[in-house]
Image (cartoon, rainbow, N blue to C red):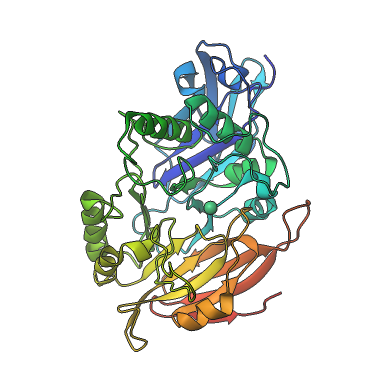
Amino acid sequence: MANPFTLGVASGEPLPDGVMLWTRLAVDPVHPDPKRPGGMAPRAVEVRWQLAEDERFTRNLRQGSIQALPVWAHSVHVRAAGLRPGADYFYRFRTGNQHSPTGRTRTADDPDSTRPVRFAVADCQRYEHGLYTAYRHLAGERPDVVFHVGDYIYELRESARTVRRLEPPRRETVTLHEYRNRHARYKSDPDLQAAHAAAPWVPVWDDHEVLDNYRGRGDGSAAFLKRRGAAYQAYYEHMPLRVRPRDGALQMYRRRTYGMIADFLALDTRQHRDATHMLGPAQEEWLLTRLRTSPVRWRILIQPLFFARRFVPGPPPNLRRDSWDGHPEQRARILAAGAPGLVVFSGDVHNAWAAELKSDFLDPAAATVGVEFVASAISSLPPATDVPAVLSANPHLRFFDGRRGYLSCTAGPTDLRVAYRAVDFVDVPGAPLRTAAEFVTEGSGLTFENASSK
Ligand SMILES: [Fe+2]
C-alpha cells in the first residue's frame, strides 16, 4: 500500500486521565470516486497505535490495534485512558509496513492543580485565501491545548480570490463525498498537520462546516437534514472527537476543565439554534448552571460568534443578526449570571478585536462583567470595515488588528494574558510571526501589557 498517512495525525478532547488519538487512512486524499474515499479499497484495515511518555517510545509504552472502517472513511478514533494528569505524551500509528508521523499531546491538569494553562485560539481557514503560515508558528509554541472556534472548512464554491486552488469540480459541497474531500483537501496542508501534531485540540464549529449562516434544522426539509448529517459525519471523521454522530446529530457542547484554573465551556451556536434562541434551552441551562457554580478561577466561553454589541454606523443593518447581536436577551442572561472571571473567545469576523463586556452595552458607566478576545483568521480574507467609526460607536471595543493570525494565551491563578499573534502576509510562504498586542486581565477590564504594534 502507498503511504496512507497523508492527512497527518491529531489528538484532542483532553481529560486529566486521557486523550483521543486520531488519524484517517487515505492513499489519495481527494479521490474522485465516492465509493473509494481517500482512494481506499472498501474493506476494514487494521491500524496499530502506540503512546508513550517519550518521543522514542520507550517509557510507559501503551499500544493496541483498531479497525479502520470504510463506513467512517477509514478514520480511527482511539480513546487513550489511564494516563497521568498534566503530562506530555507522544503517539503514532502503523499499518502494514507504513508508519505515521509522531504527534505530541498532553492531558488536562489534575483537578487540584493551580498551574497556569497555556492555550491557543484559532479559526477561519479558507483554503483558497491563503497559506497556513500562522499554524506553523502556532505549532512551534506547543501550547497545552488548542481551541478552534469554527470555519475549519468552507463549504462554498471556490473563491474568486485564490492564493491556491481547490481541485475540480470546485463547487459548493453537498454530499458526504464532497464534504469528505473538502476536509481532506484542507487536512493535506503540512502547516495544519503540524498544528494538530503539536498539541491536543478542542474544536467547535460555526456555519461553514455545513452551510453559510445556517441555523438548527435549516428549512426543515429532508434534503437539508441529509446534507447537515453528511457534513456532521465528515466533520467527525476528520476530528479527534470523543462522540460519534447519531441520527444526524452530533453532541458538541461540552466542558474541558484544567485544574482550579480554567473551565473551558465549548458552545454549539448552530445545531440547536432557532429564530429566537442561539443555544437552545438545554444548552443554555447547562451553561448558566456551570457559570454560576464553577469553583475554578476562569469561566471561558469557547464559541465562534462576536459576543459584545457591535454597532456599525451607516446604512442598516447596523447589527449582525447572525451573531449575538441577533440574540440580545440570551446574551444578557449569560452576562447576568454573575460569573466571576468570565472570558469569551470568538472569531468569525476575520479581524482581531478585544472588548470589555458590559452589564448594559448602551450605558458607558455600566459595570464591566467580563472580557472578550476575538481571534482574526488563519487565512480567510477580511471584509471592508470602517474601523475608526466602529471603535468610536462602541467604546467597550478596545482593540483592532487587521492581519491574519491567532491568539496565544496563558490563564494563571491571578491573571489571564492574551497575545495577538499576526502574520503580515499569507499569499507566499515564510511570513515571520509578529505580536500585534498583549493584554492582561484579572477578569473585569483590559490592560494593554504591550501595545507595540510591530
Ligand atoms: Fe470565517
Q: Relative to 22, say whether 287 is above or below.
A: below
Kindly identify the residue that appears in the image at 56 percent across and 62 percent down. Answer: 407
Compared across the picture, whether 432 is left or right of 274 comes to: right
Compared across the picture, whether 49 is left or right of 367 comes to: right
Q: Position of residue 293 (x, y in %)?
A: 22, 63
Observer able to see residue 134: yes
Compared across the picture, whether 40 is left or right of 354 comes to: right
Kindly identify the residue that appears in the image at 45 percent across and 30 percent down. Answer: 78
Kindly identify the residue that appears in the image at 55 percent across and 38 percent down. Answer: 10
Q: Quadrant of the C terminus?
A: bottom right
Q: Position of residue 231 (x, y in %)?
A: 45, 34
Q: Quadrant of the N terminus?
A: top right
Observer able to see residue 411: no
Q: Position of residue 358 (x, y in %)?
A: 35, 78
Compared across the picture, whether 196 is left or right of 113 comes to: right
Kindly identify the residue that appears in the image at 51 percent across and 22 percent down. Answer: 73
Question: Which is more toward the observer, 33 or 193?
Answer: 33
Q: Relative to 334, say whether 392 is above or below.
A: below
Question: Which is more toward the observer, 216 or 399?
Answer: 216
Q: Position of residue 306 (x, y in %)?
A: 44, 64
The residue sitting at the bottom extreme is: 365
